[in-house]
Amino acid sequence: MASAASTAGRRLTRNSASLIAARIVMAVAGLASLPVLYDQLGAARFGVWALLGGLVAIVALVDLGLGSALVRQVAGALSDTLHRSARLALGVGLVWGLVLWLVASAGTLVGWPWLARLLQLNELADEARQAALTLLLGLLCDGVALPWRAVLEGTQRYTALAWAGGGTAVLGAALAVLVVRLGGGLLALAVSAAATSALRAALVIAAARRWRPRLRPTLRGARSDELRQLLRYGLRVQVTGAAGAANLELDRFVLSGTAGPTVAGGFELGSRLLNMLRLPPAIVLLTIFPMAVTRAATEGPAWLDRFHLTATKWLTAFAAVSSALLVVSADPLVRLWLGRPVWWATVSIAVLAPSYALNLLSGATAIVLRVEGRPGQETGYALLSVLLNLALTWPLLHLLGPAGVPLATSIGIAVGTAYFVGRFHRTSGRPIGPVLRAVRPSLAAGALAGLAGGFAARVLPDGPGRLDAGLAVLTRSGVVVLLAASVLLGTGFLDRDDRARLRRLLRGPRSMARTIGGALR
């Protein structure tokens, strides 16, 4: 058993390291290029560019849940029969990628006049339409590559994905900067983005065909019962994903329709920084999912319960402290990044960060449900979140102005997450007490550090320039981290096993695999 845990730990370490490196490269490339795009395009045109990106992102999420379903099929393909089922699933994914592009392109052509009026695109409407259709070509490339991406994820070949994603992200950011420096507008930017997607798709397909040439898409011999089973699982994930997209993407469209693209662009900038909060845990959960499918199949529900408790504890610690840091440092962080204050970026960070953190603590619960083949439980919480968001958006918008839009989203996410976690424990028969005891120190640390850091910010150094903003971020972050660490240590967050693992981890990189493996045993 120890050998299995050690092997899993080494694989998890390698996969996590590869994806973390790639996602950091992608995030840095995006963060470095956005200030240039904002300066060169101007606030209004940048806001339109953000809206187009949001539209394509929403369309991309209409994948029938096949992204998760294909990875699950590939990860479980341990026999010839399951191998054939996995190939069938990959074939369905390929066909749907083509169908989705056709439907989205036709819908854009037909519905664009209405959409342009709704979002107040005004004189930028024609340019934006051409850019949207071009960006959909990039969506086509990603759809074609989806089956092969699932092969790499399901077989845990994350290093290949990391190289493809990280390399094309750097290239895409460089092309975008070059385009706007040369005076290009929305259409030229869209061409550079589509070309980057095409290159990324080619790299992913080549890597998958190299490592797993037998796992290729096919519809030969497809049976209706297999298709129904695949789509039944996928559609439950799809509803959850669509509802989540409504929570994350709806705000910018409401803001554009009521306050114009400039405000929506400010919200987009804040969202980009907020995504840094979600990045590390999202990477770890992505790499854990295929391994969790395998470990749960071989070691049973007891391992899954231990995994759930341990992962939730550490996810909450990271999310609570990071959220407090972002809220306290929101304004100087935006000024350090952009070189100027952008009020709506600061507002979106301060309002949304706490709910994002609360939502992250349910990440391990979602993994457990998907491993057990019960993703439908996510649907209820996602729908509750989006319905509550929609119900609160207009009253809060009229009461508080544009700031009410992200506040409605924040309330919807928080209430939906609480409902999801509670329902999971109630329906599965798992006691919620151990989880509450595990997350209580982290929630207390985040809340106290955030409040104290906010008061301390009034007397800490700050100023109008980038150097002053950098100093403000550094000092505020130091206060938050120091206070949070003190609360965590004082409330017994680290148990005896945690302290032993931490000591092994500090001895050097060779101990990391054993540390992670032990945590997952």
Image: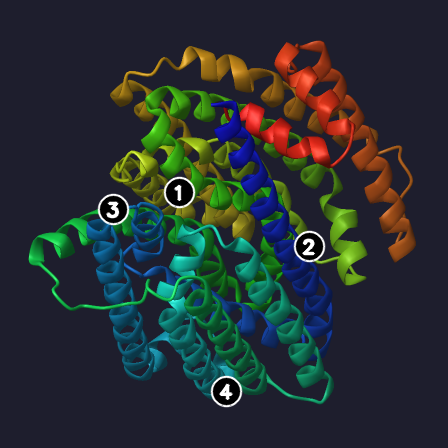
Q: Which of marks 2 and 4 is in front?
A: 4
Q: Name the residue under label 2.
A: 343
Give the mark, 3 or 2, whose residue is nearer the N terminus: 3
Tell me the residue at 79%/61% (across/down).
340
Q: Nearer the viewer, mark 3 or mark 1?
A: 3
* Three-letter amino acid code at the position of disc 3: Arg
Q: Mark 4 points at which residue?
A: 127
* Three-letter amino acid code at the position of disc 2: Trp
Residues under labels 3 and 1: Cα distance?
Answer: 25 Å
Would you call the spot at circle 2 few (<14 residues within 10 Å), some (14-19), or many (20 or more)? some
Residues under labels 2 and 1: Cα distance?
Answer: 22 Å
Residues under labels 2 and 4: Cα distance?
Answer: 27 Å
Give the mark, 2 or 4, whose residue is nearer the N terminus: 4
**Element type where label 3 sits in the image:** helix
Would you call the spot at circle 4 few (<14 residues within 10 Å), some (14-19), or many (20 or more)? some
Observer able to see residue 292: yes
Q: Mark 1 points at which residue?
A: 392
* Three-letter amino acid code at the position of disc 1: Leu
Tell me the residue at 18%/68% (across/down).
219
Name the disc covering residue 236, or none: 3
Give the mark, 2 or 1, whose residue is nearer the N terminus: 2
Where is residue 179, by image quadrant? bottom right
Would you call the spot at circle 1 few (<14 residues within 10 Å), some (14-19), or many (20 or more)? some
Q: From the viewer's perspective, is residue 408 above or below residue 295?
A: below
Give the mark, 4 or 1, whose residue is nearer the N terminus: 4
Q: Nearer the viewer, residue 436 or 404?
A: 436
Q: Which of 94 and 518 is in front in this view?
A: 518
